[in-house]
Amino acid sequence: MAKMPEKLGSEYYRGFLTRQGQAFYDRINAQLLQGDYSGKTTFAITISNPETSASDCFAAYKAIRDDHPEFFYLGFQSEFTRRGRLGTLEYPILYAPKIIDRIRQQMRKRIFQIVRGTADLSMFDREALVYERIAKSIVYTNNGDVRDHSIVGPVLLSAGVCEGQNALLLLCFRRVGIPCIKVYGRTKTDGWHCWTIAWINGVPVHCDVTWDGTENGIVRFDYLNLSDNQISNDHYDFKCARIPECTSEALSYYSHHGLCVHSYNDLKSRLKKDLQRSISPILIHFRYCPSSGDYLDEVRKAVSAEEIYGSYKLCYHPGLKNLAVIKG
């Protein structure tokens, strides 16, 4: 089983490389940190097999891109050549140095805006606030623009696909002291997808901010801190030796805040109290199955039974059994 990452997860995938792959990783990382945007890194080869050297090099480059979303200017493709005891990796640099510096300044500014005011909060509350701010401020777009696939889209355009949104979440989580890593898998609707595993007080949990976009300006936290079992409702092909098992359901937003209902009477009491107090949205997780099997009908019946009046909208996630009651 994968352990909790050191350095807040910023070198997590380095740990799964061969010794030679780690040497390649460290050389690329050092060069990038020094501001070398040449797009070319040369290594001393320690293994005689050319195919192994090339494989180690490509694995190191992928690990760099997965571990370090701050290297947003690295292109996807790379090419390895070898001459004697020296190997060279060439990779595209997507922006000119001045543009990189300008984007980096905007990135730091955006991260500061997202994480401000979190220093005195608990780890869970820090996480939830950062998560909510990103979910509210970033729109999902997939226009074939390379910026959508890195932190550049969310930073400059407040838009991006899962890779861009996840990149911003990773850097913000790490800024507030939450270890986290990027995870690849598939979903039933979007095919290949990526999201985050974070360690909250040492416990690994899934977080998918892309799938928790706002509805009526409200974040429902359906995908904050899920277990393997919970997220497997619509995410799959993510389990492997490198990925930690996420077994706890106690850290989901609904469990942590006591938003679960265990019976019809429990549901009625909760709705009456919160609707009369004008709480909106009312977030509910069902821990029981209605006799009719229809969760939305169960809520309507409870509202009618308690003679609660006014307009409201019901938003239900059937797989996770989460419901939001939105007034107005």
Image: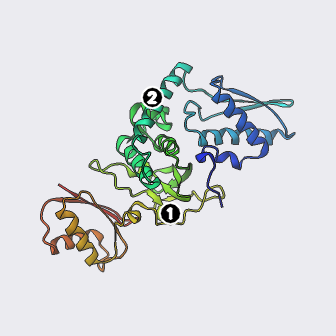
Residue under circle 2?
106
What residue is drawn where x is 76% and y is 46%?
18
What residue is drawn where x is 85% and y is 40%?
47
Residue extending farthest to the bottom is 291
Give amino acid for label 1.
Ser
Count neighbours of disc 2 (C-alpha within 10 A) and say few if under 14, some if 14 to 19, many if 20 or more.
some
Side (left or right) of 193 relative to 274: right
Percent x, y of residue 192:
52, 49
Give amino acid for label 2.
Gln
Asked whether the viewer can see residue 145, the reply is no
Percent x, y of residue 232:
50, 62
What residue is drawn where x is 45% and y is 55%?
124
Q: CA distance from mark 2 to mark 1?
A: 34 Å
Upstream in the sequence, badge 2 or badge 1?
2
| Front-lying residue, 1 or 258 | 258
Q: Quadrant of the C terminus?
A: bottom left
Percent x, y of residue 228:
52, 63
Q: Quadrant of the N terminus?
A: bottom right
Tag 2's secondary structure? helix
Disc number placed over residue 227 in the picture, else none: 1
Side (left or right) of 33 relative to 69: right
* Residues at marks 2 and 1 touching, judged by CB atoms closer than 8 Å: no
Tell me the mark number nearer the camera, choosing from 2 and 1: 2
